[in-house]
């Protein structure tokens, strides 16, 4: 029904009539042919031979929905085939990797397929999350885990293993969500039977990540930014302070700011996190304060009049997201080490680079700033996101205020 052919590669939607399912229906698959070899990819749909014959023309709502689903599967595979063919390195293993489905049937190879897909697509955060998930699973169960082993009991034991390793509930939440995505793929592709599916109510339920209390008070912030130490520690202290003053900008965006981002006394930027996922690009504007100007002069590149010059000395000209991530991870790691030293020295709870964003939002909220302004300055797409973002700190303040009611001394 759907066909594509170019450069010796053919992609077709077919009814696999070699063997009927228990339902008496046959699976609809996408067939890829290259160098006389062929491979089939499941669409998750089943039809009778009679319905397949009329699928292209049918006006039945059921068949129209199936046709749209098959067309979507065909389009996904066709686009990946075209991308590989354009690079001149098409092979079935590469296609399977890009589709996030490995040729093997083990949990390990399936996760590795996802990892390779994220690498090829430049999806850095997903790449590292799935890679960490795979490493934890292999420490727990080895390098050859069949999908049939992934039961409710197996997941519960994995959960306990991760907790014993010192993983936080938030980290376990990330790992288990990644694992669930891979298991869902296996279920759709017929590798895992419906009765074996281990997630959901009454089965294994993924723990919710804890809300981390990351915001510092004004008193604590003053202690941090006035701390005197080694040149290195003061540099990373200033980077945290710059992030806090610049609307809680994350280090990925901060380290790659250029002098061209400074417009009329403000730093104007678009969050890299949302630049490729949002239909409406939101530009964030932060007033360039005297403190921020001092930090740039102290630790940044000189302003040579070139708008493409980076503000800070760590960034490099590259479009490789993994190279960018390596820079950001290195600076963030060193900064967090310095912040831990400062926290211990000045007597505040341990905090990280990410606390700059929470501190910015919370200080404004507690000073009575309108939530709409906070939402816009953070680059959130809605007030609901901002309200949820601040919810844990609202509770923290209520608990503290409740304690005041019985503070008789």
Image (spheres, rainbow, N blue to C red):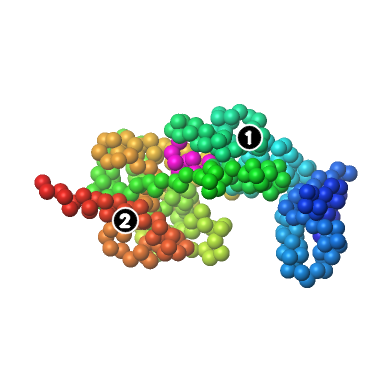
Where is mark 2, residue-wise?
A: 394
The quarter of the displayed image where residue 345 is located: top left
**Cα gap from disc 2 to disc 1, whole angstroms:** 43 Å
Residue at numbered disc 1: 149
Above or below 282: residue 257: above
Say which of marks 2 and 1 sits in front: 1
Which residues fall within the magenta stretch? 167-175
What residue do we see at 63% from left, 34% from top?
149
118 to 367, vertically: above or below: above
Q: Residue furthest right?
A: 36
Residue 72 position, x and y percent, is: 72, 59
Q: Residue at x 22, y 53 (%)?
A: 401
Residue 258, given in percent of the width and then of the height, sits at: 47, 53
Nearer the observer, 6 or 212: 212
**Visible residue check, residue 393:** yes
Quarter containing the N terminus: bottom right
In the image, residue 323 sits, relative to residue 273, either above or below, namely above
Q: Earlier in the sequence, mark 2 or mark 1?
A: 1
**Front residue of 369 and 332:** 369
Q: Residue furthest left?
A: 409
Residue 397, x across and y down, in percent = 27, 53
Q: Residue at x 53, y 43 (%)?
A: 204
Give the residue displayed 82% in from the left and 69% down from the top.
57
């Amino acid at each position: 029904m759907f066909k594509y052919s170019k450069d010796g590669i053919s992609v077709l939607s077919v009814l696999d009539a070699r063997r009927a399912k228990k339902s008496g229906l046959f699976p609809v698959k996408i067939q890829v042919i290259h160098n006389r070899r062929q491979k089939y990819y499941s669409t998750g749909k089943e039809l009778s031979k009679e319905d397949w014959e009329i699928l292209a023309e049918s006006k039945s709502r059921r068949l129209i929905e199936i046709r749209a689903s098959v067309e979507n599967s065909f389009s996904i595979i066709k686009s990946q085939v075209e991308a590989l063919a354009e690079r001149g390195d098409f092979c079935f293993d590469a296609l399977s990797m890009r589709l996030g489905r490995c040729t093997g049937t083990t949990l390990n190879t399936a996760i590795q397929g996802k990892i390779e897909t994220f690498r090829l697509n430049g999806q850095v955060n997903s790449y590292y999350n799935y890679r960490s998930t795979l490493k934890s699973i292999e420490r727990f169960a080895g390098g050859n885990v069949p999908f049939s082993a992934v039961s409710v009991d197996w997941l519960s034991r994995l959960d306990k293993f991760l907790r014993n390793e010192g993983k936080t509930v938030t980290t376990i939440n990330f790992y288990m969500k990644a694992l669930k995505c891979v298991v869902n793929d296996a279920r759709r592709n017929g590798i895992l039977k419906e009765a074996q599916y281990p997630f959901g109510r009454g089965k294994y339920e993924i723990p919710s990540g804890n809300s981390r209390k990351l915001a510092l008070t004004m008193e604590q912030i003053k202690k941090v930014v006035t701390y005197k130490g080694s040149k290195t520690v003061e540099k990373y202290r200033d980077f945290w302070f710059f992030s806090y003053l610049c609307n809680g900008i994350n280090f990925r965006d901060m380290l790659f700011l250029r002098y061209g981002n400074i417009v009329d006394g403000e730093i104007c930027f678009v969050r890299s996190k949302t630049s490729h996922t949002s239909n409406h690009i939101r530009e964030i504007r932060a007033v360039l304060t005297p403190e921020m100007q001092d930090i740039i002069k102290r630790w940044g590149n000189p302003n040579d009049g070139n708008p493409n010059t980076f503000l800070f000395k760590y960034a490099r000209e590259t479009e490789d997201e993994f190279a960018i991530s390596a820079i950001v991870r290195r600076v963030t790691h060193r900064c967090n080490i310095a912040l831990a030293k400062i926290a211990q020295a000045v007597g505040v709870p341990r905090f990280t680079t990410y606390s700059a964003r929470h501190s910015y939002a919370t200080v404004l909220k507690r000073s009575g700033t309108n939530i709409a302004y906070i939402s816009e300055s953070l680059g959130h797409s809605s007030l609901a996101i901002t309200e949820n973002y601040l919810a844990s700190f609202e509770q923290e303040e209520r608990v503290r205020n409740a304690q005041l009611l019985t503070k008789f001394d």
